Structure formats: structure tokens, C-alpha cells
Image (tube, coloured by chain):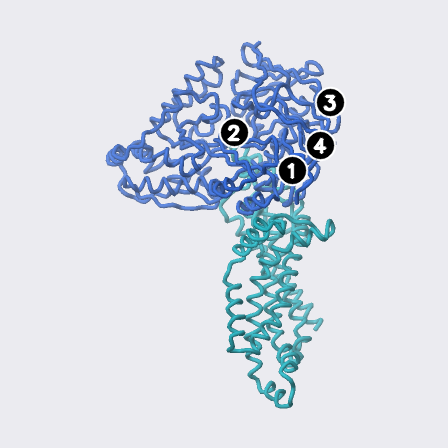
Chain colours: A cyan, B blue
Amino acid sequence: MWQYAIKRILLTIPTLFIASGLVFICVRLLPGDPALLIAGDVQDEAALDAVRQSLGLDQPIIVQYGLWLKNMLSLNLGISISSGTPVVDLIVSRFSVTAQLVLIASAIALVVAAPLGLFAASRHNTRTDSVIMITSILMLSIPSFWIALLLILVFGVELKWLPTVGYVSADENLLQAVRFMIMPVLALTFVVLGQLTRMMRSTSIDILGKDYITHARAKGLSEAAVLRHHVFKNAFAPTMTLMGMIVGSLLGGAAVVETIFTLPGIGRLMVDSIYARDYPVIQGSVLLVGTAYVFVNLVVDLLYPFLDPRVKL
Amino acid sequence: MAAIGVVGCGQKVPRSSDVKSEIRIALQSDIRGTNPGVNRDVFTDDVLLQIVETLVTYADDLSVVPLLAERVERSQDGTRYIFHLRRDVVFHNGAPMTSREVVWSWERMLDPATNWVCRVWFDGSQGLKIESVTATDLYTVEFVINRPSVAFLDLLSNLQCSPVILHPDSVASNGDWIAPVGTGPFKLDEWMRGEYVLLIRHDAYRIGIGERNGLAGNKEPAGEVFRGVIIPDPSAAKAALLSGQVDIATRLQVSDLVDIEAATNLTVFKRESLDWNVLLMQSARPPFDDRLLRQAVAHAIDFSILAEVVSGDVSQPNASIVARSSSEHISCHQDRYVHDIEKAKDLLSRSGYEGEPIKLITNKRFANMFDNALIIQRMLIEIGLNVELEVLEWTTQIDQYYSGDFDLMSFGYTGRTEPSLGYKAILGPKSENAFYQWDSAEAMALLNQTETELDPGNRRSMFCRLHAMMLDEAPLINLYNNYIIEAASDRVIGYDAHATQKPRLWGVSLSTAEGEGGE
């Protein structure tokens, strides 16, 4: 297994290298000039040239690429054009906020979705199953920004129970941190919950039709024991795979929820950086999100043999 | 020498003795940095305005009045300015402000290594050059410039450039920027990137001369702590305001008006800003190199309807570069195109336009620009122009603006207080800079004359002539000054919107009864 893990990690290096190279090219193909955002309203070419020079944007693209490559190999992701701070510092602090949000939301969704999907499967083609299915599809279909706005309207504006925007770190004040995180986590949980419930239900239904389930029932095992010991373990492995993909994509794709609730996460940082044409931050963020995606899926793959003994790595 | 004094009109500022709490203001975007005029944008300028100050600044009527200076004298030939500094001003580090710091600040700004965005305005590359800045005594500074410039004091007040007076402790011994040690009513206490900016009261702040007047006068910091909460999403900002999580929100949109005006616990401030909305027409290439076509467009637009609908009835039409809120906006600037569909159709039929598709570029970052484009498109279709909307991301649109690669563009200019600076933004040879909108040698010559004309009456006449020439040539169409919509909780005392659209946090506090609250 360790050999497999090392091989996967080594494969990550060229993947990320190619991805970041593509990002470097793509962001420079975008129309727009960061210097215009700093000195645009001064409207003077000389002033703009001076800003470009100070940002290193007056160099030919190939020189910029060479410099970036050299720095990247020494784990130096450069300096943010917008804020002048090291990109590493920016993305590490922002990533921790996103990781909290995504991991908590995904964990809650998994804890709810796994038994819910299993329960729906066990009541296949009944009214209970239909209710759970329709609810899951609704959760899947409603965009996260709409849920977020609805939560803000109800719990923030009308009831005034929860803060609508902002972030407090757990180190600073745990209780406040929880209060500020409730609505963003809920908004994200809704979407993940629908996907996981559907996956758990469909794989469980599939497994419930297998011969060994009929055999288990024939042995006189209770339905609860069949579901717990035979269906759950087998159905959970594909759900975990989906979970890995969801977590991986959300680590870079929670920008909407982060923007609405004003959470200083990596998704919002990426969006802001794209608007500001902050090339080093865009590249650094993509690199980090890509690494996280690969890492999360690697962890899921490594967990697979524990969930399904038939799988050998 | 002619003396420029303090205008003593404006609002009374409440005393600070009854307040002791944090006031929260929604910021639409994080600040880019803390180095004034170097790494900046409009949101950065908004915050730094509370921390640092200039020698002169804008009054309520947008005239230039002293701030850190007590008075300013100009030589008869207009090439020497003597600033008599206030003697009671102290920096945030407790050091008194003297002519030494003023000279140091200006030498630093004019040093190319600082990368001050407005250095080109003063280094001779645009004509005007500061020849010297010298301290004639501890509280007197003399600026010598290479030629008379009526706009000089305005440039020294400019809000985008922030030519502020800093203490040398703001930079390290090697010149690297540390943090602003200014003279403003607030000090920067903490900046959490992407989250908030915390400002605390400068307890040793010495109030200026007279009552609060624009960005000058009594700037006593009444509130102790201001937290600028960064809320990029407009809906979230509105929700935060309605739920009481922030006390003040600026740069609100017309679409927010219904909700915020319905809220009983909010005070809404509405007024016109200096920023102006325009419809740009690329006159350097067909089809808009045809003056008749440009005039047809001008007469097709119903300015009153446009301003009323897009600004929520806050703004009135203004075809002039000179803002309606400026004291320079005299009667001749009220001349504008008459909405006349038949005349527009007639001009169109006499032009060389043959029905080819025309792209009208706009963006969704700024709701006013998008709404203007949408309404103008319908008005132009009505006279027979084949106009299609093209919605771009804002940064891409700016790129196209600078390269001149457009037919029609719904755009907006940051407000200029001095008319000549407004005209400078649009007037110039397109062969030199594609972002110029009006390429007219005659108008440029007249604009150059305004820069050295010291008689205010003659100068105003010149701007009237420029306005008339612009209406005739129709190189672009000025629509109206942008709207300002701001709101504050009713527990906030002393807040008011200003035409520069800059939040003025001095004199603002929370009422005692609810002062200890807040999320």
C-alpha cells in the first residue's frame, strides 16, 4: 500500500507542474492589466508604465515564466500584486478557513447522508423513500447562493439569531467562531447532503439485490443487522469516493458561499485575484487547491481497503 | 500675494464625550495596501483618508481649503506657493508636524523609487514641474513650480493621488514602507486581510479651523473605534445593514433603496457625486468618425428618463464635465442635447451609417453602467441603430477603454473637482493615447490657456466655450453625475454623505443608549 501511496504522490508532481504551467499561460491570455487597476484613474501612460515596471510586468512573458518557475521550484510562490504580501502567507491563512468550512460541512453531510440513504434504500419504493429522494433532489437543485441568501434573510435579518457576515477564528473566540460558521456550513451542507444521500441510496439498493443479502436474510439475520453488517460497508465505499471528489472540488469551489458570508477563504481569494489580475495569487491558489484535491483523493483511495477488503492496493 | 482662507460653513460635529463603542462600516472591497497613492484603489483611498491628511483639501462646495496648512499664499506670477502650517498638529507617534516632515514627504513622493502614481503630474512630463520644496522656517514651506498653474492646489488635494504628509517613521531606514504614521483623526490599529480594517481614535488629534466643511474643518474623531468590515457582495452588505451587523454602508445601489428606505431603523443619505456617467463613441474609426451619427445618438437619448430611472431619481442630467455639485458648474454648463427623436432620425439619415451592427460595451460590476447601456440600447434602436450589448468583465472593459477598441461604451469617470482635470481626462491626441475621447487641437489649445489663466471670471468663460464646443462635436456624451446612496443605523450620530463619495468617519459616534451593543 505504501508503495502505491508513494507512486501516487510522485505522480502528483508532474500533474501539478503541468496544471500550474497551464494556469500561468491562461491568466496571461486574459485581457486586462493589473496596472490599470492601480493607476487607471490617473490616466497617464508614464504612470502606468512605472506601475508595470514595479510589478515586474514589463518583462517579456518568457522571462516572467522562467522567473516564476525558478521561484516555484524553491517553493517561493511570489508576491501578491494587489497586496504586496507573500503568496504563501496569503493562501495558507485563507486555505485554513476554507478547510474548516468544507470539512465540517462534508462531515455533517456524511453523517446524515449515510444512514438516510441506507434507510431510504431499505424502504425502496415506499412513501418514505420518495420523500427522502425528492428532498435530496431539491437540495441538489437549489444553488448554494440561494440557500445562503435565504438563511441570511431568515436567521440574520428577520430573527437576528446569527451574524450574517464575517469570520471569527476558533483561537480568538470559540463560541463566536461557531456562531459565524453555522450559516455558511449549513448552506454548503445542503448541497453535499443531497449528492451523498442519493449515492448512498442507489448503491444500497444495488447491494440489497445481491445474492449474499438474500443468503443473510435466509440465515435469519434481522433486517437491521443485514443493513448494518452487509449493506452499509459495501455501499459506503463508493459514497466515500464521491465524498473525496466533493471535498476536493469544494476546497477550491466554495467561493460563492465564502463571498456571500464574507469568509476569508481560498475560493474568495481566487475570485478576487482573478478580478484584480493578481497573477501570482491565482497561480499559487490553483497550485494549492490542486494539491489538496489530489491529496484528499489519495486519502480516500488509501482508506478503500479498510472499507472494502476485496480491494487491494 | 493672494490668500486662500478657510470657508467656515458646514455641519456641527457632536462631542465625543457620550460615546464609547465600536462602529462598523461595510467596505465593498479590501484595501490594497497602506502606502497612500502607491498601491491604491478607490476603496483603499476611502480608508486611508481617515488616517492621513494633505496640506489642502476640498470643502463642501469642492473648493480647495487649507487642512494641515493654516493658510496658503500664491505669488503674483503664480509660480510660488507658500504654505503656513498649523502649529498644533501632531503625528500618530506623538511627534509635532513641522516643515521638515512636509519637505520629507514631498521629496519621497517625487522620488521615482517610491512609485507614487501621480509623480507624473509634478515631474514635468505633463508640463507642470515642482522645481523645489523648501522649508523657509519650522512652520513654513515654499513650493516653486515651473509655470503658473491654477490647478496646482487642486492637484495637492487630489483624492486618488493622496499627496499626504507622513512622518518618516512610516518607512524603514532602507526606504521600505512600514505603516502610515499620519496626522489624521484615526490610526490604523489592525488590518486582517479579507476580513476587516480596524481604526482607533487619534487621541492627540488637533481639530482644524472652523466647523466641519467637506474634508476640512473640525475633524474631531468622536467614535473611538471603527471597524471596516469587508463585504464584497452587495446583497450581503444590505443584509448586514438591515440586521444591524454593520452601522454604516456606503456605495449602495438603487436596487437596495426599497428595502433600506422601508427599514425604520435606518437613515438613508442620497446625493449626486462627482463621478460622471458617459457614453463613449470611438470617433477614430467608422462608423462614429461621422459627426452626424454622433449627434444623432446624442439627440436619441432621453437624459431625464435615463438619470431618473438609473439613479432612482437621485441624479439630474448633466452634459458637462463639471459636476453639478461643483461651484464651477455655472449656467452655461446646463446646456445639453434636446431629446428629439425626429431630429435624431434626420441626422442618422444624413450620416453614412448603413445599418451595420454596433456593439455597446458594458459590464455588470457597476450596476449604473449596465443599466445605462440597457436603456440607451433601447433608445438607439428606436431611431434605427442596430445596437447589440456586449457585457464584459470590468478589467477587460478597462483594457478595451485604454486600447480604444470599441464602438460604443457605457463608462464612468472618477470625479474631478477641478474642471481642467476633467477635460484632461478626455481631451488629447488619440495618436498619442488611445484612451483620449476628444481629439481637437482647438479645444486643447483652449484647455492649455485655462491652466495659466489666473482670472476666475475669464477662466469660467473658457470652460463655457469648451462645453459648447464639446456639445457641438459630440466626441462623447456625458449623461449625469453618479448617485450616492449610503445608509446608517439610527443609533449613529453625525454621519453624512459627501459629494466626493468618501466616508467621513470623524464626528461620527454611536448614541449612548445603545453604544455598548453590536455583534
Foreground: disc 1 or disc 2: 1
Name the kind of residue labelled 4 in the image: Val
Across and down, in percent, residue A249 comes to: 58, 61
Residue linked to disc 1? B23
Which of label 2 and label 3 is nearer to you? Answer: 2
**Which badge, 3 or 1, is on the more N-terminal residue?**
1
Numbered tag placed on residue B171 in the rendering:
4
Which chain contains the residue that carries disc 3? B
Q: Which mark is residue B96?
A: 3
The Cα atoms of the two marked residues, 4 and 1, are separated by 29 Å
Work out whether mark 2 precedes mark 3 in sequence or the reverse, and give the earlier one.
3
Cα distance between the residues tagged 1 and 2: 22 Å
| Neighbourhood count class around disc 2 (C-alpha, 10 Å): few under 14, some 14–19, many 20 upward | many
Using the numbered discs, state the Cα–Cα distance from disc 4 to disc 3 in whole angstroms.
17 Å
Given residues B282 and A174, the one toward you in this image is A174
Foreground pick, B296 / A279: B296
Q: Amino acid at mark 2?
A: Ala
* Marked residue chain, label 4: B
Question: Residue shown at 51%/73% (left/top)?
Answer: A130
Image position, residue B114 (x, y; %): 64, 31
The numbered mark, 4 or 3, whose residue comes first in the sequence reads 3
Q: Secondary structure at mark 1?
A: strand
The quarter of the picture where residue B340 lies is: top left
**Residue under pointer 2:** B499
Vertical side of B32 occupied by A70: above or below: below
